[in-house]
Every structure is written in C-alpha cells, then in structure tokens.
Image (spheres, rainbow, N blue to C red):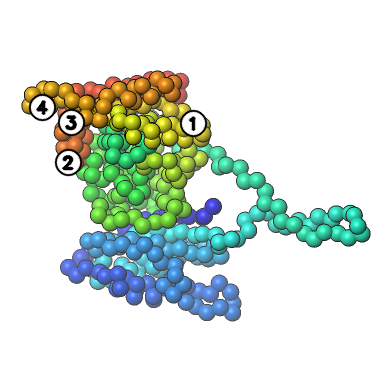
Amino acid sequence: MPLLRWLFHRTSRLDVLMSQPTEAAVIAALKAVAVPPSSPEGRTSDVIALNMVSGITIKDGRVVFTLEVAPDRTAGAESLRQAAEQAVAAVPGVRSVGVVLTAHRARGADTSAPAHAHAHAGGGHAHGAHRHAPAVPAPRPRPLPGVRTIVAVASGKGGVGKSTTAVNLALGLQALGLKVGILDADIYGPSLPRLLAITERPTSPDGQTLRPIDRLGLKTMSIGFMVAEDTPTIWRGPIVQGALQQMLWQVSWAPLDVLVVDLPPGTGDVQLTMAQQVPLTGAVIVSTPQDLALIDARKGFAMFRKVDVPVLGIIENMSTFQCPHCGQTTDIFGHGGARHDAARLGVPFLGEIPLAPILRETSDHGTPIVHHQPDSPHAVAYRAIAATVWELIGPGE
C-alpha cells in the first residue's frame, strides 16, 4: 500500500501580478529544486530530472501539482515540498501554491517480512532460503475523534441526484438540532463547492490540520475547495485514496453528531477506503425509479453488504413530475421502483423526492432547498427522510 501524505499549503502574495504563470515557467522554477543523492556516491539532481513532479494544474494564478518521492527519501520529503512550494511561489503571476506530497513503494518491491532460512532433511541436502509473504489483514476502521456517527450517501451510477440529496439530508439532520458535517468524497467530480456556493479555501492554523469551512451551519470539506472548478483532477488511485484519508484524519471535524459523506457514484476505491478506514454507521442509497438505475443501485447494496456496512435504506429521487402549469403528474422515469427494490432487499424505503425545476435551480445557485425554502414539499420530504435516518442510527449512540 502506498505511503501517502496529502498536504495543501496556501502561499499568499501581497503583490498580486497581472501576468498568468505558464506550465513552462513552473517547470523551470522546479528545475532549481535540488534533490540530494540517496547514496554518498550519487549525484545531486532536481525534482524535474528525477520525474518527481506530475499533475501540474494552473488556474487564475493558483498552481497545484503532485510531488512524488521515493520511499528512501521520505525523511526529507517535507523539506523538499517546502523548497518546491517556495520555488513556484516566486514565479511571476503565481498567487497560491498547492502541493500533494506522495511516497510510493518501488514497483515489485517485496514488502513481506525478512527472509527466513528453512533447512529440510532428506536426500542428504538442504533447501535454500524461501520468502513467505505473511497474510495481510484488512485494515480495521478506527473512529474519527469527536464524530458520533458517519452516514455515507451512495448511488450505483451518476446523474441520480445523489449530491443534492446528501446536502439536503445533512441540512435535514441539522434541523433536528444535530451538529452535522459533510465530506465531499468525490475527488474527480466534487459538487460541494457549487451546491453550497463555497469559493474560499480552507485554512490551517498549525500547518497540519485543515479547518473545515462552515456554511449554513454545516462543517464542510471538499477537494473542490482547493482546485478550480474547471480544472480536472488527474490523480492516480493511490493519491486519491491518500487525499481522502487526509480529509478524514487531518480535518478538525469534532464535535459532530453526524458526518454525511457524499461518495462518488459506483463501487470503487473510495467506497472501499471509506469502509476500511472509518466505522460507517450506515449507508443511504439514492436511485431514480427506472430499471437501469436500480440495477446499479443493487450493485451498491451488494458492495456495502460485502464490507459489512449496514444499508439504512433507499431513496427514490426524481420520483415523479408535476407540471407547474397544468398540475398534471407524469412519471418521467417511472415510479415506485426503488420502493419495490427496498422491499425485495429487505431494507427500509426512506422516501421519495419528486422531480422539479426548483431543485435544479437551488442546487445550481448554492441555496439548498431545505435551507432556502424550508416549507416547500421537497424540503419537507428531505426532513422526513433525515428524521427516519436519525431514528435508525441515533438512539443508543
């Protein structure tokens, strides 16, 4: 398993320059960052020559890149990161610098215990030493300090309104008088900045722990707070897992009654990392009524069952549509499919959310409907679902 430490440091500059930095200028600056030799007979090189830099993204003067160090250089990795940050910060036009510091074991490296020699009697000769890789147990989840319960919001596929549901569920839980946070765990497609109209970046009082951004009374964190909205996150799986771990363990979440985690769609590394790293109290699955979405929702249910995470229930989103002009109801994606699947799978049906333009409008404007129109039918439905979820996880905690 790669050894990854995710750090984001903002370097502010008082003399904001009008010129925009280029990737070539950033690379030229990084060529001046010297890397000492790993052995006495080696030569000093630089981070570019050693292929340690990847994923350079530049937007509005904000520069983000990954600095990958070899396992034998981890002792000096932080000094190297600081040197790289300072070098890029000096490039004209750079307003802030973000560095993702990673360390990977060499490919093919043996991570097993040291070799043991086993002598075998027979035939008058002994066999040589053999390496035996010990069985590696799955990591045990450990609680997040000061976080009472953790609820994952998942979907089998994208486009079913999962993130909108997660935000409004969090606000519905907050309406019950609970202290609530929300973690955007979708590294490649973060939605929280847009859903809550967050444009500022998190701060770190000690350089080690990030302070979550408070919005509408929710503690929030997303990789999208640190990367421009239209900048793709081109990271490999281990880096994504490491970033998620740091957003769990190096964010001052406490005290919280509930941390809502907006998972990316599907069943992959992030879902597995969450199940292995923290004790998920349960998962809520969001689906639309049509068969295609329900097939993938069943895969999500099966995944959580395999990793021993209780499924708290299923929500049917875009359940039906009522024309705002004539009042006629149309089941655009069908109706009742999620309720039927919940009964078949033996899990609670948590409720249904109708399809309506107001949900799209409030989401796009960063004004979730539970906060913006608390008396609307959709907000009432979200709060009812939140109350049911808290009934399932709250008593006895």
The answer to whether marks 4 and 1 mark residues whose Cβ atoms lie closer than 8 Å is no
Name, please, the residue furthest toward the front. 291
Which circle, 2 or 4, is nearer the viewer? Answer: 4
Residue 291: x and y in percent read: 33, 31
Residue tagged by mark 1? Answer: 305
Q: Which mark is residue 324?
A: 4
Q: Decide which of 366, 76 is in the foreground and name it.
A: 366
Which circle, 1 or 2, is nearer the viewer? Answer: 1
Residue tagged by mark 2? Answer: 365
Q: Earlier in the sequence, mark 1 or mark 3?
A: 1
Residue 317: x and y in percent read: 28, 30
Callout 4, which amino acid? Answer: Pro
Which circle, 3 or 2, is nearer the viewer? Answer: 3
Write the residue at 23% across / 49% down. 199
Residue 271: x and y in percent read: 44, 41
* Quadrant including the C terminus: top left
The answer to whether marks 1 and 2 mark residues whose Cβ atoms lie closer than 8 Å is no
Separation of disc 4 and disc 1 at Cα? Answer: 40 Å
Callout 1, which amino acid? Answer: Arg
Q: Earlier in the sequence, mark 4 or mark 1?
A: 1
* Disc 4, SS: loop
User: Callout 2: 10 Å neighbours few (<14), some, many (20+)?
Assistant: few
The answer to whether marks 4 and 3 mark residues whose Cβ atoms lie closer than 8 Å is yes
Separation of disc 3 and disc 2 at Cα? Answer: 15 Å
Separation of disc 1 and disc 3 at Cα? Answer: 33 Å
The answer to whether marks 1 and 3 mark residues whose Cβ atoms lie closer than 8 Å is no
Q: Earlier in the sequence, mark 1 or mark 2?
A: 1
Residue tagged by mark 3? Answer: 356
Q: Which mark is residue 372?
A: none
